[in-house]
Image (spheres, rainbow, N blue to C red):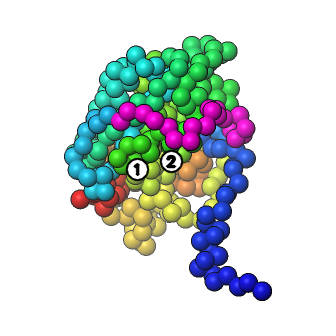
Amino acid sequence: MLTIPPAALALLLLLAPQPAPAQVDFEVFAPDGTISRTTVPAGELPRVSPKAAPVAEVVTIQQTGAPADRFDLVFVGDGYTASEQALFHSQAVARWAQITAYEPFKTLKVKFNVWQVNAVSNQSGADNDPTPGVRKDTALGGRFYCDNLARLICVDTSAARSYAALAPGLDQALVLVNSTTYGGSGGTVTVSSGGNSLSGDIVVHELGHSIGGLADEYGGPGAYSGGEPREPNTSLLTAAQMQAQNRKWASYLGRSTPDGGVIGTFEGGAYFDKGVYRPSQNSMMRNLGRQFNLIGVDKLTAAINARTH
């Protein structure tokens, strides 16, 4: 009888093919800045013809150090033809400028490398844009009206990551879809309309998750019934309880915050309107177009500094 050591067994299980998820959760963003969530069956998501080894030109937008010493953002374009790569470049540069208008990205801009991967599409645009029923042959299969929501854009995330991996370093893939229509999505990759400036805040919000480990601060029907959230910006504790136990953001209470007002405990967050608290009235993690609150800024700053040299 063959006996496999536990360490080897763990490695085999890790390397074994994992079943594809039956459904995928997405954040959905509205032009007024409000955020919600939806679940899309995996079978309804875009899939493009597989490429064993995608080939694309990689352009440097900003390089301030070796990839191992920097946080590497990679823009991948979808729906940009060979003659539209200059347009993609201008929109990627503009999106990076939007990101660095927010703290702490503004102050820590030098900590990032920013790359552009020119995935060439056969046709310009995206499915269902400007109207449902429009079909385009694009590198990532970008599609508006994902889950029948006009502003929700889905792409083939596997293809997006394959292209993004062509960059010298990859910490976060950011897909720009060739459209001026508001839209995007948050998930395993962040998607936004390259030609719509309002869509830029979608990227900023998603970096709050991927870099800072921040929770969503918007609510939803019902009351939170789980344990103490692991994220630094949501809690079951009131301000008085935080102070008494010296937990979560106790040391921040009463301090001014970049998104307005002072840090306290405001009910609603982590997808529930009741039973859980957030640090400020209305930050980027609750509503687009706002600054990050003080807890968010400090957690992002710490994470970026820890990742870079």
Q: Position of residue 213 (x, y in %)?
A: 44, 55
Q: Is residue 189 above or below residue 251?
A: above
Can residue 61 be seen here? The reply is yes
Q: Position of residue 249 (x, y in %)?
A: 39, 61
**What residue sits right under mark 1 in the picture?**
171
Tally of numbered tags: 2
113 to 233, vertically: above or below: above
* Any part of residue 290 in sight: no
| SS at mark 1 in the image | loop
Residue at figure coordinates x 50%, y 37% from the top left: 54
The secondary structure making up most of the magenta span is loop
In depth, the one of 3 and 180 nearer the eye is 3
Measured along the vertical axis of the image, is residue 110 above or below residue 155?
A: below
Rendered residue at 28%/35% (across/down): 61
Instruction: Give the crowd class for mark 2: few <14, some 14-19, many >=20 residues within 10 Å.
Output: many
At 59% from the left and 79% from the top, the residue drawn is: 7
Q: x%, y% of residue 11?
A: 59, 71
Mark 1 is surrounded, within 10 Å at the Cα level, by few (under 14), some (14 to 19) or many (20 or more) other residues, namely: some
In the depicted structure, whether residue 169 falls above or below residue 102: below
Residue displayed at 46% across by 67% down:
241
**Furthest-right residue in this view:** 1
Q: CA distance from mark 2 to mark 1?
A: 21 Å
Part of the protein shown in magenta: 40-58
Residue type of the residue flagged with mark 1: Asp
Quarter placement of the N terminus: bottom right
Image quadrant holding the C terminus, namely bottom left
Which residue has dot 2 on it? 216
The image quarter containing residue 304 is: bottom left
Which of the two labelled residues, at mark 2 and mark 1, occupies the earlier sequence position? 1
